[in-house]
Amino acid sequence: MGSGSSEADREAIAELVVRRLEQAAERDRSWLKTAGEAVGLIAAAVAAVYLIGGLVLALRLLLDGSSVSEVAALIGQMARELVITTGLVQALGPAIIVALGVGMVYAAWELPTVRDDDPRWPGLHTRTAGVPTWAALILLAVVLMVPAAALISVEARWSPAEIFAVVFGFFVVYAGVLVGWYAIRRVVPRRPGGQSRYKAERGLLAAAIWAAFTLPGALLLAGSISLEQARMCLTTSADPIDGLFVASTRDTVLLVREEDGNEAVVAVPLQRIVRLDYGLPRDAFSPCPEPRITQQPTTAP
């Protein structure tokens, strides 16, 4: 009797140990799965920012007269860090700032204050603040496109390509505004105000939507900034390197230079540059100085 009982105890203990080991292994697999998903999300976010930066630089080059094939080759020659920084600072940054401000407003107040009496998408027959919704949304899309249009107007660059970019950008922004209006409008009337969780959800939803339809305008605004003429004077030659100024990193200056009818990105280390001029017409730059030739010391025989 005692032997049978001890055998059953040993089997129970062994089963418990196996179950504990399986639970530990399951936790490890769950942790690895979560870590893998986090790494995947980070990689996707970096790729998205890289794509946005590439679109900004591509639009800038296209509006400055480069062909599509030249733009593809030029973007491929640029440093990945430069493209990511451009997308994050010049396009995604403004959209995030707008989204944060709007998210706080939507979290504090019940917006939009409309009755859910028009189930048709996207509810343009309602009225917002006494104004027909369709007119208010068109005005919002126009306002979002004003900065880019104003920049192009100031630079007197109303070429057919830029007019097309502004018009196309307006329709993209307006489509995003319609989707965003419908999404917010369908969520707001479903719960009463005053609940902290509901306010947070409403604020996050509004922030995400506003970031989405502010991004095209911010991208067009960043892409409308024209590349300036630049001249680099080198330590080893009096012949300058002329081109379009792209960026200056911690250790390199990047220019787009035209050679034999083709454009290429020229990267020159800072230690080789005597002077960098940009922002003037090409014929207004000063000539480069003659390189200084240092006399090598000679030793007596």
Image (tube, grey):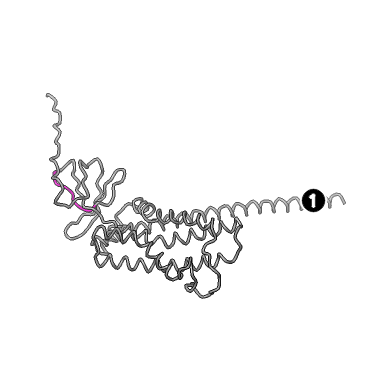
Residue identifier under label 1: 9
In magenta segment, residue 12:
no
Residue 73 point in image, percent of width and height: 28, 59
Instruction: Determine if residue 234 is in view.
Output: yes
How many labels, in total?
1
Residue 88 point in image, percent of width and height: 39, 53
Residues packed near mark 1 inside 10 Å, few (<14), some (14 to 19) or many (20 plus) = few
Residue 9, relative to residue 274: is it above or below? Answer: below
Q: Is residue 39 left or right of residue 229?
A: right
Outermost top residue: 300
Residue 261, relative to residue 115: is it above or below? Answer: above
Residue 299 point in image, percent of width and height: 14, 25
Instruction: Give amino acid for label 1.
Output: Asp
Outermost front residue: 130
Instruction: Determine if residue 55 is in view.
Output: no
- Secondary structure at badge 1 equals helix
- Per the rendered image, the range of residues in magenta is 238-244
Q: Nearer the viewer, residue 100 or 125?
A: 125
Residue 136 point in image, percent of width and height: 43, 67
Q: Nearer the viewer, residue 109 or 9?
A: 109
Q: Quadrant of residue 158?
A: bottom left
In magenta segment, residue 241:
yes
Residue 174, relative to residue 218: is it above or below? Answer: below
Q: Is residue 89 left or right of residue 1?
A: left
Outermost right residue: 1
Q: Which residue is painted at 32% across and 65% down in the image?
A: 166
Q: Quadrant of residue 58?
A: bottom left
Q: Nearer the viewer, residue 101 or 85?
A: 101
The quadrant of the image that shows the C terminus is top left
Q: Which residue is painted at 58% across and 52% down in the image?
A: 31
